[in-house]
Amino acid sequence: MMPTIHVRPPLPGPKSQAILARRDAAVSKASFRSTPVVAASAHGAAVTDVDGNTFLDFTAGIGTLNVGHTPAEVVEAIRSQAGDLIHLCAIVGSYEPYIALAEKLNALVPISGPKKTFLSNSGAEAVETAIKMARAYTGRPAIITYEGAYHGRTLLTLSLTSKYALFKKGFGPFAPEIYRVPYPYSYRCPHCRNEGVCNLTCFEDLERALITQIDPSAVAALIIEPVQGEGGFIPASYEYLRKVRALCDKHGIVLIVDEVQAGFCRTGRWFSFEHSGIEPDLVVMAKSLAAGMPLAAVTGRAEIVDAPHLGGLGSTFGGNPVACAAALKAIEIMERDNLNQRAEQIGEITMAHFRRWKEKYPIIGDVRGLGAMTAIEFVQGRNDRTPNTEAPLKVVAEAYQRGLLLIRAGLYSNGVRTLVPLVITDEQLEEGLGVLEEAIGVVAG
Ligand SMILES: Cc1ncc(COP(=O)(O)O)c(C=O)c1O
């Protein structure tokens, strides 16, 4: 097989450099970029830059392109919808693609009983909408969130988000009535440290918070990522999630799961919470929902989704017809091509390599994931779990020079995550993993 990667170092090339200089001059310095790639086109798992270099993409737009870059059928659906109706605004009137997508999501989300949906533009906007629904439904103010959580960058979602120095420094004051508890992060658990038997002692932290910080009768919602994304691709134990469900039931707390990064086949299920068998009350989705078009959704129990007053929810662009058409086609592809199964295969292949590398390179402290949502956590050495924050930056840079696009992750920014497009071929996957190991080898010395 011909390799996909085709790069002519040194990178970035001259045309890329010229555009990067313009970016530096014209765009806010506060917007971070993981690599210097300047894309001209992308198809499947491959990205070609303006100098003609072709890279393999192990980021998929941070989990946005589970059906790959520019799938022909989605492109055609976008073209066709744009020719008929680009926009109307769901506050002004109705159009079928919005309704069809809501019906599809209601059918797809495994919550029993009647379900309804509201569409918006971004993951953050959808998270805020879910919080509004929960507050309107319960008449309560407080929200429980987690250490390591990432729910977005708008003021309310930033208040829910963790990782202070990178995301929040200097942006306060933050929204009130938010209470943060430790996430079940077994590798860094102060109780079990991933070494012995997990007794779910971390769940007691949550129970204690309902005594020391806030009375459960004032809590509207608990929001959790069943697999923390930005926090480092940490799957919560299924038993932990089941206990959370029971606790929410006991106290009438709305359980919101944030599936923005983990949803749409990424973990081998439509939604990552499905692995645990729980039924949340509200599910927040975005990213891969619409194959790269800006679209987000909240789907959940109809009585909660309907709780805000008439006119209480709205958005100028939310549920735009072109984005809805892309989403309907993307979901059709995921179903038809069984991308859940493919995600599991990709996860197995990837984790087999990661486990081998963990034995080989002492700077790899932990490897983990669920389905094709996989990550490596870097530490100082075999017996020293101190986060190694330099290694991921160097690995990402070395990989870029060799034609692989990567992005970091982790509460301590000491991880590298892989989110390959689920349409990647086995050959491309092995090629990219080969480059990743080379990069780690260089950094490990
Ligand atoms: C779990 C999770 N929630 C919410 C968001 C925010 O989504 P957006 O960037 O579309 O606002 C993200 C983005 O990475 C995310 O990973």
Image: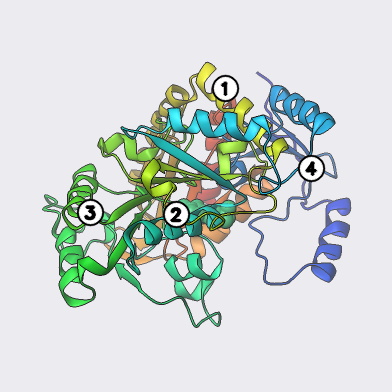
Q: Are marks 3 and 4 in contact (CB under 8 Å)?
A: no
Of labels 4 and 1, the one closer to you: 1
Of labels 3 and 4, the one closer to you: 3
Q: Which residue is mark 1?
A: 332
Q: Are marks 3 and 2 in contact (CB under 8 Å)?
A: no
Type of residue at label 4? Arg
Place residue 134 in its image quadrant: bottom left
The quarter of the picture where the N terminus appears is top right
Q: Which residue is mark 3?
A: 248
Type of residue at label 2? Ala
Q: Position of residue 117 (x, y in %)?
A: 49, 41
Of labels 3 and 1, the one closer to you: 3
Q: Are marks 2 and 4 in contact (CB under 8 Å)?
A: no
What's the distance in space between the residues labelled 3 and 1, CA to CA? 34 Å
Q: Which residue is mark 2?
A: 130
- Viewer-nearest residue: 404 or 125: 125
What's the distance in space between the residues labelled 2 and 4, CA to CA? 47 Å
What's the distance in space between the residues labelled 2 and 1, CA to CA? 26 Å
